[in-house]
Structure formats: structure tokens, C-alpha cells
Amino acid sequence: PAAALKAEESWNATFRDHRGPSKDMVEKVAVKGHPGQLIEFLVGEGIKPSRTMVRQLVAQQGIRVNGQTVDDPAMELKIGDEINIGKTQFITITRA
């Protein structure tokens, strides 16, 4: 029961109250050098299986970087960027 209440509280804070994800919900992806373009990063790191899927998510306004909706799949990323894919996938780019 306690674990269920904690999970519900975390869900409500993230999605209902829009406070952002808790630390355990954020996947940290370490890169060497410059992360490059969004589309190449997501496919190259195995986060999304294809460039087509990334383009579709962008067209559907399903990807945000640092809180801003992405309209160009070729946008350049940098270390520290926070990527949200849909409502439940959260990624932070860190230096390796």
C-alpha cells in the first residue's frame, strides 16, 4: 500500500500538477563531444528505432526540448538539454 501511494503521488505531481518528472523518471544519456542533431541523437542512442518515427513525433508536436515544442527534427542539441518525448519519456543529455 505505501508503495502504491508513493507511485500515485509521483504520478499526480508529474502529470496532474505539471511539476515535471521526479529524478527517478529521467533517463540520463551520456555523450562524448557534441550530441548533434535531435533526429540523429534519438536514433543513434537507440531511444527511437527510426528517423521516420522521430519525424512523425515532431510533426505531431510530441517532442519538447527544454520545455519548447520542437518543429525541426534537425535541431542541434547541447549538453544539459532536457528532452520530453510524449508524456512519459524524459531524457537529459550529460557529458560522458
Image (cartoon, grey):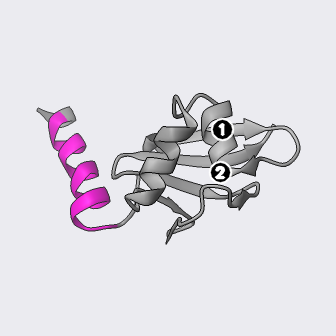
Question: Image quarter for residue 21?
Answer: bottom left
Element assignment for label 1: strand
Q: Few, some or many C-alpha atoms within 10 Å of disc 2 (few <14, some 14-19, many ≥20)?
A: many
Q: Position of residue 35 (x, y in %)?
A: 77, 47
In the rendered image, the quadrant that contains the N terminus is top left
Q: Residue furthest left?
A: 1
Q: Please tell me in which quadrant of the rendered image residue 65 appears.
A: bottom right
Tell me if mark 1 has few (under 14), some (14-19) or many (20+) residues whose alpha carbon lies within 10 angstroms of its own.
Answer: some
- What residue occupies the far front of the structure in this picture? 52
Residue nearest the observer in this picture, 93 or 49: 49
Residue appearing at x 23%, y 43% in the figure: 6
Queried whether the magenta region covers residue 11, the answer comes back as: yes
* Count of numbered labels shown in the rendering: 2
In the figure, is residue 93 to the left or right of 95? Answer: left
Residue at 72 percent across and 57 percent down: it is 77
Q: Nearer the viewer, residue 16 or 10?
A: 16
State the separation of the CA atoms marked 1 and 2.
Answer: 13 Å
In magenta, the rendered stretch is 4-18
Between circles 1 and 2, the one closer to the viewer is 2
Q: Residue at x 63, y 46 (%)?
A: 39
The residue wearing badge 2 is 38
Disc 1 designates what residue?
29
Magenta stretch: includes residue 17? yes
What main secondary structure does the magenta stretch of the protein show? helix
Q: Is residue 14 left or right of residue 24?
A: left
